[in-house]
């Protein structure tokens, strides 16, 4: 039987979803080019991450990364009260990693020559029945399949579904990531190897240690990481919060070093007033806190003709699920599997793929939204004792438990990243120097 013709693929966006897609489709032998708008290498995008085993399994089975090279293991989850006392603790081996670490490992598994920086896609067009991505530079990329992995503000989603827009969830995440050496020793001691949570009426804060900037895992070289969710009024508070030190208005985040000093001062003051001392110290020790806005988004479909969207561009799940990255890589792996199963019949494969992945997204959104009401105030829960409220909500939100790594056969692809490449001259980069096992 003649071999099916493999589609030529252009991926717009070179972050977690884009790289996962590039790697998964290359496993099948497809030629994949990734176009990323950022002119410089992506760094420090998201701080700490909890990554689900679904993604870790896939990374391990394709020799992209292992738990040991990617993460710091936790031993327990602890809930503090206002006086800093531990009101509950239970064993929890959640692996803690960072956006940088995950990104770096994926990046090294994708060939340099097929990853293009400084390519901002501004619109899609069609030529001879094939989709064409047009870039701000005036260049164009024609492909059999164009995949939008361009995140929350996706241009590709705008092309497919112009009426679908992200909806503000009612709260923002203040975040901090910095070297453990900058914090008092007692803060590091309290937080190390633990998933620490504190919750009050209008907010909740969580913290864990993550690998160093270059993946360092040993004590002394790790980073402290915290996320503090705050209810924030969309009209009264949000616009000014998102205005950076240069007067530029942001939509989804204000990067480290760009948050207006008066907002940082207010946040530190709140830390003093509301947090247990150890967490207030953590917040105070953070040189440059940053902000991410929480949005909800779900598209009615994930493809049309020869264009598809995945990861955050198709559906955003709340961060409390700790599932955004694994959903993105799951979208990518599933797409590759459906293409393979349909002998690269794009129309059949995309239709089956989106049915499966829309159901996954819906499940993630709805199972979590039942317990995370908008806005974020958990007043009904906090009127009960904290001891009751914490486990019932948080223990089911970022739930990894104590599962051990075992291969997930549902995620296996027949190819291996070792054997597939854009062309024989473009092998994946496999430098492991920065990650010490
Ligand atoms: C506070 C917070 C905490 C979170 N915690 C976790 C967690 O613990 N675990 C977890 O799994 N997930 C977590 N998430 C979610 C996770 O970060 C995202 O789901 C994931 O990073 C999405 O990846 P993506 O590649 O789809 O999108 P993005 O990372 O947004 O990447 C999109 C890429 O496309 C590029 N791009 C955009 N437009 C264009 C264009 N026009 N042309 C070319 N390139 C373009 C961008 O520059 C970017 O590189 C959290 C999110 C938040 C906000």
Image (cartoon, rainbow, N blue to C red):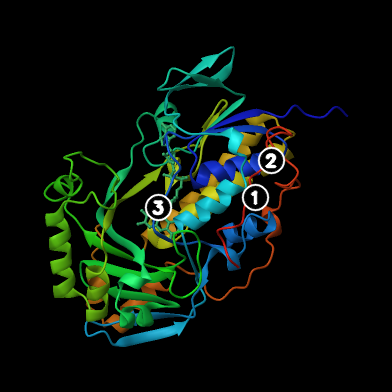
The quadrant where residue 62 appears: bottom right
Q: Is residue 32 visible?
A: yes
Residue 246 lies, in percent from the top left, at: 18, 41
Front disc: 1 or 3: 1
Nearest to the observer: residue 59 or residue 287: 287
The residue pinned by badge 2 equals: 427
For marks 2 and 1, give the CA distance.
Answer: 9 Å
Mark 3 neighbour density, 10 Å: few (under 14) some (14–19) many (20 or more): some
Q: In the rendered image of this protein, does residue 357 appear above or below residue 81?
A: above
- How packed is label 2: few (under 14 Cα within 10 Å), some, or many (20 or more)? some
Residue at the spot x=50%, y=41% of the render? Answer: 310
The foreground one among 424 and 337 is 424
Q: Secondary structure at mark 2?
A: loop
Marks 1 and 3, how far apart in space? 21 Å
Whether the residues at callouts 2 and 1 have beta carbons within 8 Å, the answer is yes
Question: How far is mark 2 from mark 3, CA to CA?
Answer: 26 Å
């Amino acid at each position: 039987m003649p071999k099916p013709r493999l589609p030529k693929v252009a991926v717009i966006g070179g972050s977690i979803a884009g790289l996962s897609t590039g790697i998964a489709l290359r496993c099948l032998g497809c030629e994949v080019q990734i176009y990323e708008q950022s002119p410089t290498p992506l760094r420090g995008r998201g701080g700490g991450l909890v990554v689900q085993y679904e993604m870790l399994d896939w990374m391990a089975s394709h020799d992209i990364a292992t738990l040991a090279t990617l993460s710091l293991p936790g031993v327990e989850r602890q809930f503090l009260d206002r006086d800093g006392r531990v009101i509950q603790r239970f064993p929890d081996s959640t692996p803690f990693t960072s956006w940088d670490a995950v990104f770096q490992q994926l990046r090294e598994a994708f060939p340099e020559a097929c990853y293009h920086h400084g390519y901002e896609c501004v619109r899609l067009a069609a030529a001879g029945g094939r989709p064409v991505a047009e870039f701000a530079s005036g260049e164009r990329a024609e492909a059999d399949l164009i995949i939008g992995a361009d995140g929350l503000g996706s241009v590709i989603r705008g092309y497919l579904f112009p009426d679908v827009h992200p909806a503000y969830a009612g709260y923002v995440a203040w975040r901090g990531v910095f070297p453990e050496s900058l914090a008092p020793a007692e803060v590091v001691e309290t937080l190390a190897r633990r998933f620490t949570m504190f919750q009050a009426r209008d907010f909740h804060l969580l913290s864990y240690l993550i690998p160093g900037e270059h993946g360092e895992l040993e004590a002394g070289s790790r980073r402290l990481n915290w996320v503090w969710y705050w209810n924030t009024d969309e009209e009264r508070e949000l616009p000014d919060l998102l205005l950076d030190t240069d007067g530029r208005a942001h939509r989804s985040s204000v990067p480290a070093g760009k948050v207006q000093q008066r907002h940082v001062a207010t946040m530190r003051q709140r830390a003093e007033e509301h947090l247990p001392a150890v967490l207030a110290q953590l917040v105070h020790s953070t040189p440059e806190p940053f902000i991410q806005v929480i949005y909800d988004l779900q598209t009615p479909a994930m493809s049309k003709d020869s264009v598809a969207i995945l990861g955050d561009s198709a559906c955003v799940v709340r961060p409390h699920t700790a599932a955004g990255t694994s959903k993105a890589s799951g979208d990518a792996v599933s797409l590759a599997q459906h293409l393979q199963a349909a002998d690269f019949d794009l129309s059949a494969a995309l239709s089956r793929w989106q049915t499966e992945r829309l159901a996954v997204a819906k499940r993630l959104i709805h199972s979590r939204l039942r317990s995370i009401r908008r806005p974020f105030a958990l007043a009904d829960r906090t009127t009960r004792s904290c001891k009751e409220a914490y486990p019932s909500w948080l223990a089911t939100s970022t739930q990894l438990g104590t599962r051990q790594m075992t291969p997930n056969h549902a995620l296996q692809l027949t190819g291996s990243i070792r054997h597939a490449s854009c062309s024989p001259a473009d092998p994946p980069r496999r430098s492991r120097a920065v990650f010490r096992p």
